[in-house]
Image (spheres, grey):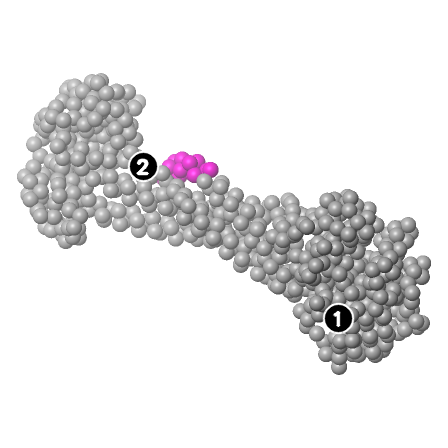
Amino acid sequence: MSAVPVAAIEAEHLRRIYRRGTEEIAAVDDISLRIDRGSFTSVVGPSGSGKTTLINVLGCLDNPSSGTLRLGGRDVFADCKGLSEAKLTVIRREAFGYIFQKFFLVPTLTVIENVILPFTFYRKPGAEQDVERLLKALGLDRRADHLPGQLSGGEMQRVAIARALVNRPDILLADEPTGNLDTARSDEIGWILQELNTKEGLTVILVTHNLRLAALAQRTIELRDGKVAAA
Amino acid sequence: MKKLSIFEVAWKSLLRKKTRSLLTIMGIAMAAWVLVSLFGFNRGYERSLNKDIDNLGFQMLVVAKGCPYEAATLMLKGGTGLKYMAEGIAKSVAAEPEVEGVTPMLMQVVFDPNKGESGGLAAFLGVDPLTFPKMKSALPFKAGGWFREPEAVEAVFGYEVAELEQREVGDLYLIPEKNVEVKVVGILERTGTQDDGTIFLPLKTVQKIFGVEQLTSIGIKVKKEADLKAFEDKMYKLPDVQVVSLTQVKTTIMTLVSTARVMVFSIALIAILIAMMGVVNTVLMSVMERRQEIGILKSMGAMAGDIFKLVWLETILLCLAGGLIGTGLALVTARLTDILVRRLLPYSPSGGLVAIDPGLVLMALGVVTAIGLASGIYPSWKAARMRPLDTIRSEVES
């Protein structure tokens, strides 16, 4: 049984402040939002609007400066108490899968080895049964024994998606996943995310500059200066 | 279902920068090579020296006071300075309760004008055919054997003399200055000792040919249960003789060997420290280059301990690979080291000079593993402390 029960996020008055000398910069400034389980949400906004900072805090990659965050109804950050890196890791591996603009694949591991790499450190019970199905669903079954250097950009990002999903996370966080891809490959990744949401019921949060991609989501949150401008 | 162990991940990480990994492995291999070769040499030298001294057959030599007791010394002194003692001393020494046996000897040296380009000295050692072969039973023969009769006009040639004089068993040899021909009945194998340059004849024959009734030395074999030190003191009290204890010689040489061991250890330690610095540098560089990847591993569930283990394992793999190659090199080049060391040292014992046994191999592998464990701590700790956000952020900030 999963330690984090249901994939749903509730954030209240989240703030993330960075200090640069005496200056305080609120990258996330008093944001309250709710992400429903099984939803597809996109986060858009200009550069420096706080998209990545927000997704980092929501994805437990970072502690907020203040505010509360609940995952599946359970408090993660409450009363501004920061969590240790070890505790954040435990939450992350149970609840989240991440994909980034860069694929961060290990160049000396094959596709299949990159996909199952998370199992080396943590394996959700029964997760390994999904690997072959996952490779097939992402069109990687014939590329399983190839090295990343032999793949196209789109294929590499699909490997990164497979790796993010191999431990059956409740929520997939995608931060500019198509930033390094051309339009056709970007669309392909967008459809994959959409399909994972509609067919698998996966909660997807997508940070993007690409409005065409953002339009695939059921809901779009627009950030400006660390605040929600439109939702 | 394919499984990926942390060992495989570590190994494949090392393959990423093959040249760098290989150079680091070779650095460790060199240290292991030095370590195994030096310690192997130290062990081999000590063992061979012990064997040589034990093969002498007697633990003590009694010589007339002021007499050089080694052929080599005689050669250096141009064959002069021989002093003699009465044969009766051998009998009185043999009567001592601590003595298992004695063997009287008479050394004589003559100038041989045919030796080399401008002549040289020929050393003859008169030995008792009844006691000497028994005491020196470890002396190996290339051909033939010992003379049996006490007054036989026969000779046993040391290896080098036989080579120099081009004599084989059955040939005759004319003793320079004395005009007496002796028959070669045996040729010794190379021993690496002064025996190689000596011509052995029966004691009585030497006494007769050279007209000397006395002895130059008496070899004494002491009973195992006897107190060697107390017996030595007793021998010192004999008038007009001096006692050369081979135990003393052995102790002196062993002290020198121990001093050499400290030097050897220092050299090995320096090699190890240099190798360690190389490993720390390589692994740390690798960790810094893979910051983002480490961040991703942590984002996908790797705990700090997992990352520490991964980097530590990489370091140990590097060191073990280097250790195995270095030990292999030391084994393969042991013979070459032996030849080189023999050329460099003024004296080297007859047996193998480099002794590499399984114990030494295990010790070397243990040392390189320890190097790996020690050098891996800092880079592993640094990698384990990385926060995923810090490593990935620069790539995803918007």
Q: Is residue A14 magenta?
A: no
Q: Residue drawn at (34%, 51%), measured in percent from left and top?
A: B258
Secondary structure category for the residue under label 2: loop
Q: Looking at the picture, do discs 1 and 2 lie on one chain?
A: no
Q: Nearer the viewer, residue A217 or B168?
A: A217
Residue A157: where, in percent of width, then height?
81, 53
Which residue lies under the disc numbered 1? A5
Q: Residue drawn at (65%, 49%), measured in percent from left and top?
A: B12
Q: CA distance from mark 1 to mark 2?
A: 78 Å
Q: Nearer the viewer, residue B122 or B323?
A: B323
* Quarter of the picture holding the C terminus of chain B: bottom right
Residue A63: where, in percent of width, then height?
75, 73
Residue A87: where, in percent of width, then height?
68, 71
Q: Nearer the viewer, residue B379 or A69?
A: A69
Cβ atoms under marks 1 and 2 closer than 8 Å = no
Q: Is residue A134 left or right of residue B307?
A: right
Name the mark on residue B350.
Answer: 2
Residue B148: where, in percent of width, then height?
14, 26
Q: Is residue B393 left or right of residue B287?
A: right
Tell which subunit mark 1 falls on.
A
Range drawn in magenta: B332-345
The amino acid type, in three-letter code, at marker 2 is: Ser
